[in-house]
Image: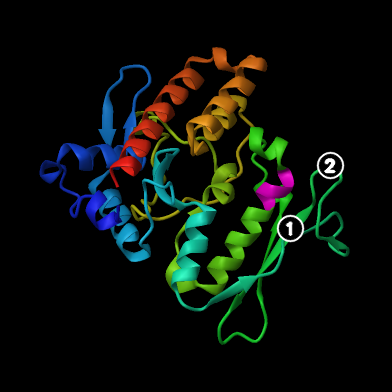
Amino acid sequence: MGTELALPKTGDVQEWNDQERALVEAAGLITTDNRTGRQELAPRATVEAYLAHCRRTGLDPIARQIYAICRKGRWNIQVSIDGARLVAERSGGYEGQTPAQWTADGREWVDVWLAKDAPAAARVGVYRAGFREAVYGVARFSEYNAGGPMWQKMPATMIAKCAEMLALRKAFPQDLSGLYSTEEMDQAGQPQQSAREAAPAPREAAPADAVIDAEVIEDDPTAAWIQAIHDAGTRDELMAIWKDASEKGAAKSPDIKAAFADRGKAIAIEAAGSEAA
């Protein structure tokens, strides 16, 4: 199923059919208030920007290659690392990349991270036709670590994804400018379940499709679990997170239960769309 067929061609909700509305909800543009169950659509400007990004990049929301998230009252559009790789490959200029490397001190870099402690940084180089050398992205763990379950379980993998995304965006700015990965934005805070619960608007309104400032906030265990649930791409991944949350007592939280139910519904919609394709 192509994005042109799956998604609405306009941001006017009155022109959507039931399938288009379901796909927009799966993409994260329709949020649910956990207390009232009321659903709200993102601002039309955000919806239009999201649809434009889908058309420009050719990424598939059903495959979770591109989606929207509302954080602290501000919307941004994110891509998965697989989506970013696909954009680079389709550009015709992508010529591979270096293996990820990690360091504890910035001087010695290793190809496999085996230490129990998290690495201090990771780097990845991307090769592009016409470039003399690889374009490197270097990500420091202290700047991106969100403290959530995945960052605690797989710190080297998470920071390597951030480094790769930095390198891909540097190598292909025309194709990936303005698009950030989930791993890069984890530290910016918890995705909101409803725009009605948003924090007060900033003094200067940002463009609807702008990425929010990478503001580091205090660790919030509930927010971390909700982020992990939101990032689950399959039912098996979702159930593994739920099992982990149950064992650690986090599954008792009403907010986490609601996030789990919402993500389960979205995954079911995505699976149905894939089967139909």
Asked if the residue at tag 2 contacts the one at tag 1, i.e. Cβ–Cβ closer than 8 Å, the answer is no
How is colour applied across the structure in the image? rainbow
Numbered circle sitting on residue 122 = 1
Q: Could you tell whether 8 is left or right of 151 in the image?
A: left
Q: Nearer the viewer, residue 10 or 1?
A: 1
Horizontally, is 249 left or right of 105 in the view? left
Q: Which percent across, then down, holds residue 167?
A: 61, 67
Q: Which three-letter amino acid code belongs to the residue tagged 1? A: Ala
Residue 220 x %, y %? 61, 28
Does residue 50 lie above or below 261 as drawn? below
- Dominant secondary structure, magenta: helix
Q: Which residue is mark 2?
A: 117
What is the magenta range?
A: 155-159
- In which image quadrant can residue 163 be found? bottom right
Q: Amino acid at mark 2?
A: Asp
Can the viewer see residue 148? no
Q: CA distance from mark 1 to mark 2?
A: 14 Å
At a point 53% along the width and 15% down the height, the residue shown is: 253
Q: Give the structural element (helix, strand or loop) at label 2.
A: loop
